[in-house]
Image: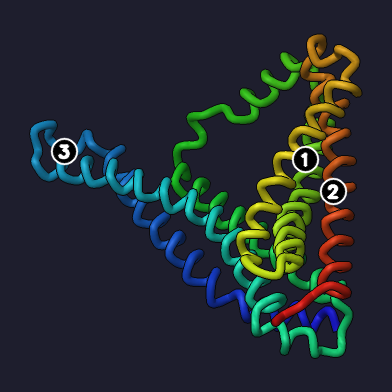
Amino acid sequence: MLSKLLKKDFYSTCRFFIPLLCGYTIAAIVGKVLFEIVLSQSSFSISSGFFDGIALFAVFYLFICIVYLIACYLMTSVFIIYDFYKTMVSDHGYLTHTLPVKTSTLIWSKTLISAFWHILVNFVIGLSFLLLFTGHLKHVPVMDIIESMIPSFDLKLTTYSFYTIINMIIELFNQPLMFFCCIAIGQLWKNHRILGAILSYIGMYIFIQILSTVILVITGNGSIYHHSGLFFYNGYMFFAALFGLATTVIFFWVTNYILSNKLNLE
């Protein structure tokens, strides 16, 4: 049943993400063309009005691309939140909750679809940067820079990569489940449920930040001021993974409990 839900949720979210990603891809291709034109300025006269116009437009277009880049990340979360709200707790929720499937399965489907779109958006954006600098990367010793930085922080590249990947995977599930949890908590309000969800998110975010900071200081035992690189990735990043995993489980449990036992769609 989960596979059928995933298919359904995939097609329902495509109408949001396909235009967003197609628009960004077109913008990235146009940006690459303008980037190459500006880099080939030697073929134009300095006083050339044509080149001045192209350069000015390229700078303006670069600003638009940066705005679009930020919008891609923001809209990805907005679309995921909107889809969950619409299909789970709005009027459409009557139809969703009549399906012969557990609430936990519905939440899993929404979470996995969210992870999929976040991965795809990051992949497309990564490709756009690779496209932009294609043909010019040979002039930048990327790996040499990374390898020279790692020893200065008393780190190993394998350790850095391991903790970073683990925390990125956890974040793929933690972020949407936190939003889902806040929406579920908002449903406990008889009136102004959207306001309740927003206030729940603000309160939860502040509480988590304070709690993580307190535990970080307690578990750090002063090491945060000594061997900071080693502590950060062997200490803090390990703690961040455990903390992220624990909060993810809590978010899922609270969301599932409220939507299974306390949901009132009136």
Label 3 vs 2, first from the N-terminus: 3
- On the rendered structure, is 129 left or right of 259? left
What amino acid is found at the position of numbered circle 1 in the picture? Ile
Residue 181 sits in which quadrant?
Answer: bottom right
- Which residue occupies the foreground of this view, 88 or 237? 88
- On the rendered structure, is 204 left or right of 17? right
Label 3 vs 1, first from the N-terminus: 3
**Horizontal and vertical percent for residue 239?**
87, 33
- Which quadrant is the N terminus positioned in? bottom right
Residue on which the image places disc 2: 247
**Horizontal and vertical percent for residue 97?**
79, 84
Whether residue 44 is visible to the viewer of this picture, yes or no, is yes
The numbered dot on residue 208 is 1
Q: Secondary structure at mark 2?
A: helix
The numbered dot on residue 44 is 3
Crowd class of label 2 (few under 14; some 14 to 19; many from 20; radius 10 Å): some
What amino acid is found at the position of numbered circle 2 in the picture? Thr
Crowd class of label 1 (few under 14; some 14 to 19; many from 20; radius 10 Å): few
- Which residue occupies the foreground of this view, 251 or 266? 266
Label 1 vs 2, first from the N-terminus: 1
Of labels 1 and 2, the one closer to you: 1
**Horizontal and vertical percent for residue 70?**
49, 49
Is label 1 in contact with label 2 (beta carbons under 8 Å)? yes
